[in-house]
Amino acid sequence: MKILSIESSCDETAVSVCEGREILSSVIATQVAEHRIYGGVVPEIASRRHTEAISAVCEQALAEAGIGYSDIEAVAVTFAPGLIGALLVGVNFAKGLAMSLGVPLIPVHHLRSHIAANYIDNPDLKPPFLCLLVSGGNTVICEVTDYTKFSIIGQTCDDAAGECFDKTARAMGLSYPGGVMLDKIATKADVKTYPLPYPKAHSGEFDFSFSGLKTAVINLIHNKTQKGEELDVPVIAATVRQKVCDMLIDKTMAAAEKFGYKTIAVAGGVSANSELRLRLEEECRKKGISLYRPELKYCGDNAAMVGVQAYYEYLSGNIADTSLNATATLPIDYR
C-alpha cells in the first residue's frame, strides 16, 4: 500500500512516500536558516513557508519515488500536536489531495510517528517495548503496547528536555537550533566549576522537571556576566548536557526495571544527542536490554516516520473524513 505522508507541525515541510516500513522517498524543505535570524521558530513565518513549499515538496517526493498521483492509495498527515497554523497547512492540503484522489485520509499523531521512526531501519522491533520520547516540546516515557496503543508512565511537568537545551543554549549565545549547537560545542562536564541542580518532579515516580535546571543555568550565566567573570561555554554546555542526560537515563532505566522491559527505544529530536545515545547504549548493555534508536536523519521532523505510523493507523481502522482538524495539543494516548 503506497501512502503519501505530510508533516508540517513546526518548521519542516516534509513529504514522503512509503510502503509499510519501506521508504520510497523522503523530502524535507527546512526553514532553519530563516528562523535562526530570530533565535527560534516564528509561527507565522513557519505557516507561510509551509504554504509556499508544500506543493513543490509533494511533487518532488512523487518524482523521487518514481510514481504519480494515481499510484497513491492513501494520504496521511500529522494533525497534532504542533504549531496550529503550521499544522493547518498540512491538514488542509492532505484533505484536498485525498478527496481529489478518492483515497483514505489517515490522521497521524506527531509523537506516535517519532516512535515509528525506529521501525524504518529495525525490522525486528515490534511492540511491546518501553520508549523514551524526548524533543523540544515533549518528554515522555511510555509503554508501546501495540503499534497504535500507548500508555504514559512518566512525562515532564514543566519544560521539555529539548526546550531546556534550546533556552540554555540561547543564554550561552549559541545560535538556533540551540540544542544541536550545544551538543556540537560541548567538551567535558565539570560539576565542581558549574554545580547545577538535579530537579525532581513531585507529581509522579517517573515524571521529569527541567525548569529548575534551565533557570539555574540562566542565572549562573547572568551572574558571571554581571561580575565580569569568564564563562567557559563548552564546559558549561557539557555540564548541562550531562545533567539532562542523567535525568532522562535514570528515569528510563528505573521504569524499565519496574515494569520488566528488556527492549527500550528512544525517539524524538533529542534522540540525536550524542551523549544520550552513547550513555543509553552503555546502560542497556550493562543490564542486558536491547536498545533501538532511529537513524540520525529520522530523529528530527520528517514525513517518512509519519508514513510508517500511518500504515499501522490504517490497519487499526483510524481513518478520517473531511471534518479532520488540526489540534495544537493532544496526548499520545488519546482515544
Image (tube, rainbow, N blue to C red):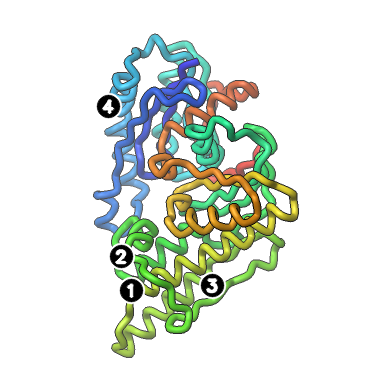
Q: Position of residue 99 (x, y in %)?
A: 46, 15
Circle 2 Cα neighbour tier, 10 Å, few/some/many (<14 / 14–19 / ≥20): some
Work out whether mark 4 precedes mark 2 in sequence or the reverse, and give the earlier one. Answer: 4
In the displayed structure image, the side of residue 282 where residue 12 appears, left or right: left
Give the image location of residue 214, x and y in percent: 47, 70
- The label shown at residue 56 is 4
Find the distance from the CA under tag 3 to the CA under tag 2: 20 Å
Between the residue at mark 3 and the residue at mark 1, the CA separation in whole angstroms equals: 19 Å
Judge whether 322 appears above or below 221 on screen.
above
Which residue has dot 2 on it?
174
- Mark 4 or 2: in front is 2
Helix, strand or loop status at disc 3: helix
- Which of the 4 image quarters holds residue 16? top left
Q: Where is 270 relative to 164, above or below?
A: above
Seen in the image, is 157 located left or right of residue 160?
A: right
* Marked residue nearer the N-terminal end (3 or 2): 2
Q: Which residue is mark 1?
A: 233
Residue type at mark 2 is Leu
* Neighbour tally class for label 4: few under 14, some 14-19, many 20 plus, Cα within 10 Å: few
Q: Earlier in the sequence, mark 4 or mark 3?
A: 4
Mark 2–mark 1 Cα distance, whole angstroms, equals 9 Å
Near-viewer residue (247 or 84) = 247
